[in-house]
Image: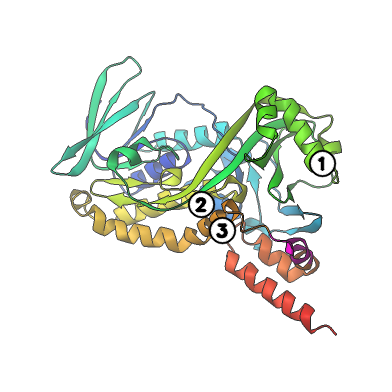
Amino acid sequence: MKSEYDVIVVGARVAGSTLAYEMAQEGFEVLLLDENLFPSDTLCIPNLYGNSLAMLKEMGVLDRLLESGSPLYSRARLNIDGAEIEGVIPGGAEASSCLCVRRLILDRTLLDHAKAQAGVTVLEGFKVMGLVRENGTVAGVVGQNLDGRAVSFTAHMVVGADGRRSRVREMAGCARKASQPSNGAFCVAYVSGYAEEGEPRSEFYQRRDRTAAVYPAGGGRHVIGVTYPLESSSWSPRFSAHAETAFRAFISEEFGDTALPRRLAKAVFEDRIRGLHGFENFWYQGMGKGWALVGDAMTFKDPRLGQGIHDALYGSRLLAAILADYDPKIWGPNGELIGRVYQSAMEKKLMSRFRQACRIAGGRAFFPEKTAVYRLLGADPEATATLLGTYNYMNDPADVEREIDRLLSSANRIP
């Protein structure tokens, strides 16, 4: 096995495998590392909107994901403190399509696709322990194989695609640009036998700072995610004591005024319930001398927004396209200059969603008039389409604000 590459990518899930594939398409030699052995699961609601499916189709993996048996769907139903909103995600047949595929399948598919490319070497079970530096520029990694042997590799660029607790980010000394702590818990379960009503659709329920979301995952399964505040909450010890019992009780007690408890009653919980207790919305500098970040290593947002997979795909493809414009020999010494291009493009595309997540984390998304506002949105087809269009990035949160202003102005003019 060779020891020198153009790019070393640390982390082989969505962001890392996508980046390895894209860099190989540009003719670069890539070493893709991960400390896990695949297939490997992770905490996530793996729902993909049309913009993500379009990128996966361009990469040549969408057909394989469709073979998982998960249904394509285009409808969404929201119940926000009793206000009902339902409709088709806008954009036409392809843009409105959604697909929920387990991370075990999604990650394995993307990794296999990257591995099949000429120029990509994959090493699973490899733990990165440190970064190699030359004259202040990152020039490789030092790590440990499964057998315990220490090994080092060099490259013109080391990319951290190793998640929200990124070791590459920590070792590179990346600057944090923005953050907003969230004192919330996020739990995810897969169930079979959930009583689906009508055609497949996504469902989102909210009662102030408690939420539940349901997505059709194929094979008679659904994935359900719930969130609740850690402060002044009895739910944390209940989930710790017995997760399934607490999960069912949470749905019954917090959403008893909906059909959700009845539809979950006969469902069977599969696998273990995964949870995240407390997290931080953050945004880091994306590139420096010899290093870069993609996916959750660079920016992490409240899971309720459901945009993490899209942002990982987008960021990885963007980084590959930017690096391809330069000779690899100048990536390291000019990383800060090239990084400005990457940072600017990422912020232009994704920052509005990050700010939205920070508003939710800071409690600024909850106000007494919220139910009335959502009733106005749900009663207006144009406003409903604008809101649902934020899911697949057809619209921006600012577009929803403009719709709210329009509806409130019209309401105030009624004598």
Furthest residue toward top: 147
Q: Name the residue rendered at 79%, 78% in the picture.
A: 411
Where disc 3 sits, the SS reads: helix
Q: Which residue is mark 1?
A: 260
Q: Image check: 257 left or right of 163?
A: right
Q: Image check: 24 left or right of 38?
A: left
Residue type at mark 2 is: Met
**Quadrant assignment for the C terminus:** bottom right
Verify whether residue 411 appears in magenta. Answer: no
- Image: magenta residue range: 367-375
* Structural crowding at the residue carrying mark 3, measured as other residues with C-alpha within 10 Å and reported as few (<14), some (14–19) or many (≥20): some
Q: Position of residue 83 (x, y in %)?
A: 80, 58
Q: Name the residue rendered at 48%, 40% in the picture.
A: 14
Q: State the image quarter where residue 242 is shown.
A: top right
Q: Which residue is mark 3?
A: 356
Q: How many marks?
A: 3
Q: Name the residue rendered at 47%, 61% in the picture.
A: 349
Judging depth in this view, the residue of 317 and 398 nearest the camera is: 398
Residue type at mark 3 is: Gln
Q: State the image quarter where residue 222 is shown.
A: top right
Q: Which circle's residue, 1 or 3, is located before the other in the chain?
A: 1
Vertical comparison of 223 with 198: above or below: above
Q: Position of residue 313 (x, y in %)?
A: 47, 48
Verify whether residue 374 appears in magenta. Answer: yes
Vertical comparison of 62 with 414: above or below: above
Distance CA(mark 3)–CA(mark 2): 24 Å
- Name the mark on residue 55: 2
* Structural crowding at the residue carrying mark 2, measured as other residues with C-alpha within 10 Å and reported as few (<14), some (14–19) or many (≥20): some
Can residue 325 be seen from the camera position used here? no
Say which of marks 3 and 2 sits in front. Answer: 3
